[in-house]
Amino acid sequence: MNRTIQYFILSLTFIVINLSAFQIASFSLFTTKEGTSIFSLDYLIAFGIMIVANFITIQLFLAIRKSHQKGFILGLIIAALQAISLYTFIYSTMFDLGLILSMISILASLVLLFIELKKRAK
């Protein structure tokens, strides 16, 4: 696959996943009092949500850089599952299904990221 197309797909994946992750992160800041320091636990949780949601985009980036086609395709499948599950989690009445699929996709993206980092270390 052409590297330009891969970077375009990575950009789309980044945008789609961060649109839903930003909504969840901003909802976690809903009860934060005005004037709270940016170094508080509430902001740490919001930042953590954004980082965890982007494990798959980091994995896709590393797979493109290493020219690891199989890792890119697997990451793309997991990214699609994660995008669908996050939108189901936010917008659907099937809250439990969205939550379960989100956890599965985040765990799968973490496993893929570790595999990609292990291949990168070789």
Image: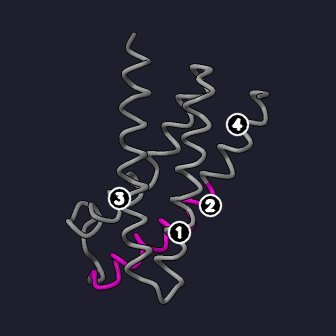
Q: Which residue is mark 4?
A: 7
Query: Mark 3 to mark 1: distance in Å?
Result: 14 Å
Q: Majority secondary structure of the magenta segment?
A: helix
> Residue 101's spot in the image, x, y percent?
43, 65
> Does the magenta-highlighted stretch encompass residue 31?
yes
> Mark 2 sits on what residue?
16
Q: Residues within 10 Å of mark 1 (few under 14, many from 20)?
A: many
Secondary structure of residue under mark 3: helix
Q: Which residues are magenta?
A: 15-32
Looking at the image, residue 4 sits to the left or right of residue 44; the answer is right
Which residue is the site of mark 1? 20
Given this view, does label 3 or label 1 mark the residue nearer the observer? Answer: 1
Q: Are marks 2 and 1 in contact (CB under 8 Å)?
A: yes
Q: What is the three-letter code of the residue carrying label 3? A: Phe
Q: Which mark is residue 47?
A: 3
Q: Amino acid at mark 4?
A: Tyr
